[in-house]
Image (cartoon, rainbow, N blue to C red):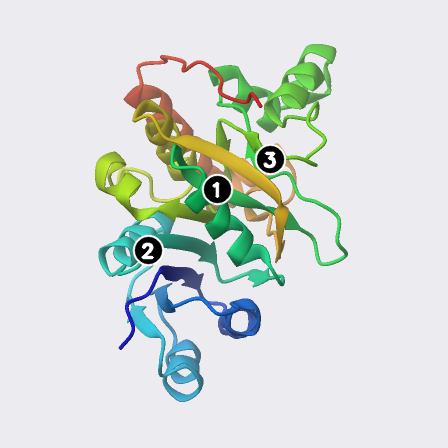
Amino acid sequence: MHTPLLTIAIQSYKSPDMLKLCIDSIVETIDDIPYEIIVSDSQTEEDTEMLMREEFPQVHFFPHKKNVGFGALVNNSIAHTHGTFLFLLNADVVVKKGAIIKMMSYLQEHEGVGMVGPQQQNFNGTPQSTCYRFYHPWTILYRRTPLRHTKRGKQHLAWFLMEDYDQLQPRRVDWMMGSALMVRVSAIDIVGLMDPRFFMYMEDVDWCRRFWENGFSVVFLPQAKIYHYLGKGSAKNGLFRSIFSNKLTWIHISSGIKYFVKYNGKSLPHYDIY
């Protein structure tokens, strides 16, 4: 078997149809790159096992009986990685032509960069918000309460969402959404795995922060583009109803508290400079 230059690791949860689209898009757009594919699946169902067994026997498949959380899936993928570079992506991603080689080439040409992320788009081609400045404690308050409608709330959220950035040129950013990231594996050896205290949410923020703390830049690369079916499970039915009825909201709030406790409220300088 060839030695892969790139490991493509897909994190999946009860989405066999999207998983098939994701793998197919990789195979169709990978170009001439030695690669391997890993799928780490949470709370695996029979449909997913059958899909992997019958249609993708060449893929390294790691099922989990329970919902182990996003970070645990990523860490499992990292443990089984053989490539020099690791492309982490969710099963609800469809890779566009040229995205993989552009991200990998950028890492090869910029030794100080530990992580790059593509522009994530809706299926109609409009860009999603996937690169951000680091959270302050009041960021969550502005995002989760009616205070987001105040003048100060709007100004803060525009700053957090980097609305002053036109997303046309590569740019160093504080952190990027973990649904699609390409990482230098040698940097992971120094930075470490995703923090297991985060079941879901904030693990990507924490990981990017640790990349910066260890001297590795985090870069948003809009020339690399993917489609992402972006779910908003934690925001269903409005704030107050969701607090009582939506488990994802509780997980998000809990992860935010854990993040600020971990760093004792200490803020990092912001790295979003050209």
In the picture, measured across the screen, residue 112 lies left or right of residue 130, that is left
Q: Which residue is mark 1?
A: 116
- Residue 149 at x, y percent in the picture: 73, 20
CB within 8 Å, label 2 to label 3: no
Lower position in the chain sequence, tag 3 or tag 1: 1
> Which residue is pictured at 42% across the width and 76% down the height?
48
Residue 14, compared with residue 106, is above or below; it is below
CB within 8 Å, label 1 to label 2: no
Which amino acid type corresponds to the residue marked 3 in the rendered image? Pro
Q: CA distance from mark 3 to mark 1?
A: 9 Å
Q: Residue furthest front?
A: 109
Lower position in the chain sequence, tag 1 or tag 2: 2
Which amino acid type corresponds to the residue marked 2 in the rendered image? Leu
Which amino acid type corresponds to the residue marked 1 in the rendered image? Val
Mark 3 lies on a secondary structure that is loop
- Residue 2 at x, y percent in the picture: 29, 73
In the picture, measured across the screen, residue 247 lies left or right of residue 240, that is left
> Which residue is pictured at 49% across the width and 23% down the height?
134
Badge 1, how many Cα within 10 Å: few under 14, some, many 20+?
Answer: many
Q: Which residue is mark 2?
A: 73
CB within 8 Å, label 3 to label 1: no
Q: Tell me the quarter of the image containing the N terminus.
A: bottom left
Looking at this view, is 141 or 195 the one in front? 195
> Which residue is pictured at 58% across the width and 62% down the height?
95
Q: Which mark is residue 170?
A: 3
Q: Tell me the quarter of the image containing the C terminus.
A: top right
Query: In this view of the protein, can residue 251 be seen by the observer?
Result: no
